[in-house]
């Protein structure tokens, strides 16, 4: 799979709410840096994300592939995230993926978006499931 196919497969798996399919795109031991969840293993991140999520609807805006060494790709998309509480939050997001040398799987993900408009709703949903 090339980086464009990886990115499109990633969004499709997110829309399906399929953690196993998402994780199949990452190497074992991959990490995720998230503005809401912090830094954690990809497996722990997606398992937790999908517990907090009723539905994900993504719309691809752009895919940016590196031209210098080919070690990363960025995915720009609109995210309509329905939390377990039923609250729907909408935002634009950029996911920056580091790639394997073969450029066929993800080794690390850094997620970039403004959390201010959704932090209170996230905290409420996330805290309620932890109690």
Image: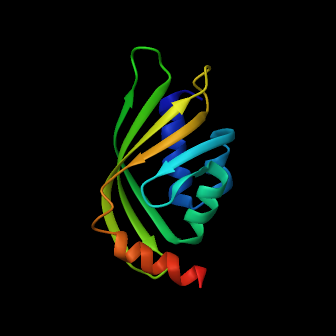
The correct choice, above or below, for 108 with respect to 36 in the image is above
Q: Is residue 48 left or right of residue 82?
A: right
Q: x, y (%) of residue 19?
A: 64, 57
Vertical side of 123 occupied by 50: above or below? above
82 or 48: nearer the viewer: 48
Q: Which is more toward the observer, 42 or 64?
A: 42
Left or right for 103, reference 112: right
Q: Which residue is depicted at the point 57% across and 24% down?
A: 103
Q: Position of residue 31 (x, y in %)?
A: 59, 44
- Residue at (60%, 65%) from the top-left corner? 48
Q: How is the structure coloured here?
A: rainbow
- Looking at the image, is 16 positioned above or below residue 83? above
Give the quarter of the figure containing the C terminus: bottom right
* Residue 102 image position (x, y, % from top left): 62, 20
- Residue depicted at x 55% and y 27%: 2
x and y percentages locating residue 68 in the rendered image: 40, 14
The residue that appears at 47% across and 32% down in the rendered structure is 4
Rendered position, 71 above or below 114: above
Residue 98 in sight here = yes
Q: For the N terminus, which image quadrant? A: top right
Quarter occupied by residue 17? bottom right
Q: Is residue 18 visible?
A: no
């Amino acid at each position: 799979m090339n980086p464009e196919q990886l990115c499109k497969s990633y969004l499709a798996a997110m829309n399906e709410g399929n953690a196993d399919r998402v994780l199949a795109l990452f190497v074992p031991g991959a990490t995720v840096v998230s503005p809401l969840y912090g830094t954690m293993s990809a497996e722990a991140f997606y398992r937790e994300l999908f517990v907090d999520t009723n539905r994900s609807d993504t719309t691809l805006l752009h895919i940016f592939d590196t031209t210098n060494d080919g070690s990363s790709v960025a995915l720009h998309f609109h995210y309509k995230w329905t939390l377990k509480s039923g609250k729907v939050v909408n935002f634009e997001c950029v996911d920056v993926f580091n790639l394997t040398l073969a450029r066929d799987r993800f080794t690390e993900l850094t997620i970039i978006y403004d959390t201010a408009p959704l932090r209170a709703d996230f905290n409420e949903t996330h805290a309620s499931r932890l109690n």
